[in-house]
Image (spheres, rainbow, N blue to C red):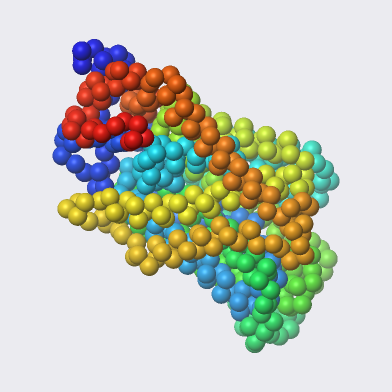
Amino acid sequence: MAATLKKMFTGSDETLNQPRLDPILEEQPTGSVTVDDAFGAPIEIVSPLGYHVDWISVIFLNVSRIIGVGVFVTPATILLGVGSVGLSMVYWVIGFLFSAASLCVYLEYLCYYPQRSGGIVTYLEKAFPRPRLMAPFLYACLFCTLSTSSAACIVFAEYILLAFQCEITKWNVRGIAVGLSTSMTMICILSTKWSLRFSNAIGMIKVLALVLIAITGLVVLCGGVSHVPNPGANFSQPFHGTSNNINGLVSALLKIRFSYVGWESVFSMVNEVKDPIPTLKTFAPLSLGVVFALYMLVNVAYFATVPLDKIQTSNEMIANLFFETIFPSSPNSTNVALTALRILVALSSLGSVIAATISASRIIRESGRQGLLPYPQVWASTKPFNTPLAAYLLRCSVTNVLIVIPPPGDAFNFIVDLQYYPESIYAFLLVVGLFLVRRRRSADMPAVPFRAWTFVAVFALLVNLVIMIIPWVPPEGGIYAGDVSFFYATYCIAGLGVIAISWIIYYFWYVYFPRRGGYRIRQITEKLSDGAQTSRIVKIPIEALAEWDAVHVDDSEHLTGNEESRR
């Protein structure tokens, strides 16, 4: 009977009946596997996507993702929020410390699961094994439907049109944005190696450009540019004018948080790194450190060059003011400088798009491999170009829809902001989950190569909690004075609604329908012809459940207890 059931539920010879054990965390004697271990995505010992992520790609994938348009705009908005140059610089340090603490959390997860790509969707699966699959399912619903590069594509389109002095209309912006999204996706589909090289090249250009801005600022600060009077004036009383407006201070903190978003990109590709733990331990922090140094030096350049009152009263982005001040000699030189700046902003957006596309495809693929998306074989497959084709196509389709459908203004801004609040909730839960993972590990398990200091993890937990609270603080001017013309926290409420809808879907899929249908959900591992492995959901009749578990779990003593109570 056992052999018959095994053949019935495993299917072809390409289906594997193997335990889901991750190195280090779930190191157990053979035959000591529970039903809970059989949920989630299988480990791909050999990556079917290849090993194209080297230390250079680790650095520049993160750098390209982090450095977008923000570095050319955000310093002025931070200054307006906090009121003084000194506190503005402190905020950039705070943003770095928070990102570094969160990076430590990810590095510890990496040491527990060094052969699992997918980043947060994988770590949620491991941190919250019960209710089974619920945590990664809720995150996958959010990420697969709302996480896009639509805003970066639109910024690219607008600035490339400005650079070449073309008319900006709704449809030519949308056309260029869709073209960018589609072309970057095609590059990624055709070759992982060349898409990473392209991302690295754009990242290098961005770093070089910011280094040149930083050097120019240091020359100004040393008095090397005669037409910039009093270059150190903004630093003579750095904390003069510091604001006591709570709205501005908390809003600036939120903007700083988003200025560093992207440092986690490479964790979605862990299984494509030949030696992930030592490589990421060294070069992921280095990438964040490079960005932090550039941010600080570019801020110094801006504040050394542009008078404070001009920053506070001008509607231009601060990078514009910087270039106008450095090149004031003739209209032609100023125009050339501004054209170069616009091209640089466009390139920064392009780099963010391709880095985000590469990273997001792995999260979507891992969600499919976990059995969270229909037809998991399609999502796991790497045919025909040895890339996650289905994941790229989904990402591109959602991005293009959100470029074309929402009208410019409130609707577009609302949809772009919608994903951020649920993301902050999942980031908070991820840190909570790290403490749960630590508690579940037995004392005799081997020490991991990296363990975040507890106070660092607690710091990350508290900052994530603050980030969850900040969006609810009413803006200065009332509840209709936010980024949109309607109630300022609508996107927070809608974000909670997305989580609630996802939970309802999960409840019907995993609890209600199985109870009504007299079956339970289990997973089996399938190996595809390209070497990829994925989980496939199977429905096991209740009367055959004990026999099925006995076949698929070697040590049946772990299965005692009422199945419903274990749900």
- Along the viewing direction, whichever of 55 and 396 lies nearer the viewer: 396
Whether 55 is drawn above or below 79: the answer is above
Residue at (37, 24) in percent of width and height: 520
Residue at (77, 41) in percent of width and height: 407
User: In the drawing, does residue 561 fall left or right of residue 299?
Assistant: left
The quarter holding residue 401 reads top right
The quarter holding residue 205 reads bottom right
- Along the viewing direction, whichever of 300 and 212 lies nearer the viewer: 300
Whether 4 is drawn above or below 163: the answer is above
The quarter holding residue 269 reads top left
Query: For the C terminus, which image quadrant?
Result: top left
Residue at (65, 87) in percent of width and height: 237
Where residue 27 sits: x, y (%)?
Answer: 21, 43
Q: Would you say residue 236 is visible in this rendering?
A: yes
Whether 469 is drawn above or below 48: the answer is below
Query: For the N terminus, which image quadrant?
Result: top left
Where residue 257 sits: x, y (%)?
Answer: 56, 61
Whether 426 is drawn above or below 99: the answer is above
Outermost bottom residue = 236
User: In the drawing, does residue 560 fall left or right of residue 459?
Assistant: left
Where residue 392 sits: x, y (%)?
Answer: 53, 33
Q: Would you say residue 217 is visible in this rendering?
A: no
User: In the drawing, does residue 414 fall left or right of residue 466?
Assistant: right
Residue at (39, 39) in percent of width and height: 131
- Along the viewing direction, whichever of 375 and 70 lies nearer the viewer: 375
